[in-house]
Amino acid sequence: MLTILGFTMIATFLVLIMLKKMSPIAALVLIPALFCVFVGKGAHLGDYVIEGVGTLAPTAAMLMFAIVYFGVMIDVGLFDPIVRGILKFCKADPLRIVIGTALLAAIVSLDGDGSTTFMITVSAMYPLYKRLKMSLVVMTGVAATANGVMNTLPWGGPTARAATALKVDAGDIFVPMIPALAVGLVAVIALSYVLGLRERRRLGVLSLGTVRGDEQQETETSEAGTSDGGTRITETETVLVGAGTGGGTGTGTGTGARVSGGPGDGKVRFTKTTGGGGSTDATDAADNSGEGDDEEAEDDVRLQGLDPNRSTLRPKLYWFNALLTVVLLTAMIMELLPIPVLFLLAAALALTVNFPHIPDQRERLAAHADNVLNVSGMVFAAAVFTGVLQGTGMVDSMAKWLVDGVPDGMGPHMAVVTGVLSIPLTYFMSNDGFYFGVLPVLAEAGAAHGVSPLEVARASIVGQPLHMSSPLVPAVYVLVGMAKVDFGDHTRFVVKWAALTSLVVLASGILFGII
């Protein structure tokens, strides 16, 4: 009964948020509370919630101060050079922008923390996606999947958990898996190419000069005097998109706008019509191949949403901030202190040095308060979900049912079975629940048939690309919150692509003889 209720509760949650019948926070709180009553343990709901909150409180604290720290670093201009480099590569080509998203997420993921990866990636790429009217779920999906592959680093969490649970060395798990994980990363780049190509076909390729206008249509209406009286002139400016990559035909919308293009000349022409019967012609030369002016690309940082003239910039403190960030990431990797403590200290130091005046510090904290509240609120709501799952015994019952369902004849292939099971299980339960609750049972079953615990451990990390979009992962709420994407929309989009990437990693591991 617990098994059925557990799966039903998870399915109910996913269906309701994907259909947008409930907000994620409400669903994370109310659905498990209701099922806790169904199980007959409603009297213990408070204990389960407090236990869940206690478990996730360090994570919430880490996210709160990580958002403040990296928010301040973005404010003071630490990542401006990275943003300019991305712009130089991406130009205004949707294909390049999606590939750039995957590359940036993969590179920043080297720090081993999904939240920081998503904060930096979204901050850099969000303005480009908005300006070009690209699909934001493409950004969140690609970033989450790339981070999921890189999340298997020994300091990222899953590999360390697998090593601890099975009492093996983390290096022995990760190093042999590098070829398979490299193939998985290539698969993410290939996915970003396909999705980017689809976006390019939908939107076309813009030159930076064309994109530099306002994000939305601007309609200017003015009264012009004539000898006959007043003539009303209406001009509608639109973002003009070249069809294809060879330039030839432009498209445009808006009242009184006529758009045309000479065949193959790579220029977009539009005509503004006037109410008095006259017309004003203008020709906008747009390089539809996406090769814009590199110098303009570097200078117009506002295209990224990072104003080069903003008052929060601290160019004289650039190297201090860079060194502080390197020290922070190094301390995280070496585990000198708990991560929440490191971020708390770093955030306090960054605020004090960059903004020595108290009113300025308050202003910076207020500027990032929305993100802090949204993410921390989501984490504590998720604590209710995980607390009920764990406290009622649903997780244990679900895991036992799945393990018992493995046929005896699959014993010699337990590593492959573990890899397949890791894809859904790490999505439906926390990494702690899977690696400390399920993995030892799978490893024991494999050992009875001569399967090495190392093979089982390696197979257990292939589900991470999908895991990073699990509703039980706090970092995913940073991603969708900063990108202003509905969690249900993100889930519908990313599940199939992330699961496919996980299967590619698993197949590569089998092909290379690693698993």
Image: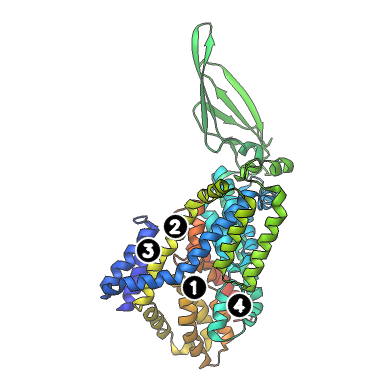
Q: Is residue 292 left or right of residue 236?
A: right
Q: Tell me where residue 143 sits by quadrant.
A: bottom right
How far apart marks 4 and 1 lie (CA) works out to: 15 Å
Q: Which residue is mark 3?
A: 28
In the rendered structure, which amino acid carries the disc numbered 3?
Leu
> Farthest residue toward the right?
295
Residue, x 31% and y 74% (percent of image)?
Answer: 5
Find disc 4 in the rendering and name its residue: 509
User: For the residue marked with disc 1, what is the amino acid?
Assistant: Ile
Instruction: Work out whether mark 2 precedes mark 1 in sequence or the reverse, and give the earlier one.
Output: 1
- Please give left or right for residue 321 compared with residue 366 in the image: right
Residue that mark 1 sits on: 423
Which one is in front in this view, the residue at disc 1 or the one at disc 3?
3
Relative to residue 37, is residue 415 depicted above or below? below
- Front: mark 4 or 2: 2
Residue 323 locus on image (x, y percent): 70, 60
Q: Nearer the viewer, mark 2 or mark 3?
A: 3
Q: Which residue in the protein does label 2 denote?
A: 487
* Label 1 SS: helix
Task: Compute the Cα span from label 1 to label 3.
Answer: 22 Å
The quadrant in which residue 179 appears is bottom right
